Image (cartoon, helix red, strand yellow):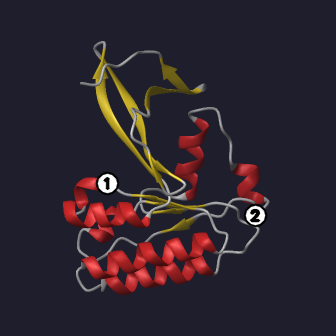
Amino acid sequence: YYSSESKANSLVQQMGSIGLDPRDYLQEDQLGFFPLQKPSVNDDPGKMLAALVSDIEDVPPDYGLIVVDHISDLVVICEDRSIMGFFASCLRLCADGKAIVLVAQSAFFDKQLLARLHGLCNTHISITAEVIREKLVKTLEVAKVGNVELRKDNRFSFEIEPKVGVRIVPMSRVVI
């Protein structure tokens, strides 16, 4: 788990708030936590993305899932070519058997670049916040799975409840 947002103890607290306790996994080396450096004025963001790819390549094969949360701060100051190279490298690593989840805010990407990156991803899931029945809920939409574009409304809304976890918000939606 690579994170630019929190430290390991913060991750433990966040997961604990939804009834999950990762401490045993961290202690037994079944979950690795690696902080991502936020870019500073003198950093070369392209080199930082290349270093991140190198770190991911070095993750032992017994780690089945790699999460990079999040790369938005880095890509906003990076050249499109470096970003495309990073995503292409992650795609290559996935073809070699790694499962990589990249978390980024789509607003940080140019729309044309975002469309090209979508093509490089095997799966594309977006999460947004919206108001439903006067309640703020999260909506997860699956746009692409296994390199197949999904054409129907593939979304559901949910809430995160402390000590419970994810609770689906039952609703129906009309798409016009």
Query: How many numbered discs?
Result: 2
Q: Report the Cα–Cα distance between label 2 and label 1.
A: 29 Å
Q: Are marks 2 and 1 in contact (CB under 8 Å)?
A: no
Around disc 2, counting alpha carbons within 10 Å, would you say few (fewer than 14), some (14 to 19), or many (20 or more)? few
Which is nearer the N-term, disc 2 or disc 1? 2
Residue position marked by numbered label 1 in the rendering: 105
Numbered circle sitting on residue 170: none
Q: Nearer the viewer, residue 54 or 21?
A: 54
x, y percentage for residue 119? 38, 63
60 lies left or right of 94: right
Locate the C terminus and report the quarter of the image it occupies: top left
Task: Give the residue drawn at x 42%, y 15%.
Answer: 171
x, y percentage for residue 4? 42, 63
* Res. 110 visible in picture: no
Q: Quadrant of residue 111?
A: bottom left
Numbered circle sitting on residue 29: 2
x, y percentage for residue 40? 28, 77
x, y percentage for residue 130? 29, 28
Amino acid on which disc 1 is placed: Gln
Q: Nearer the viewer, residue 134 or 143?
A: 143
* Res. 157 visible in picture: yes
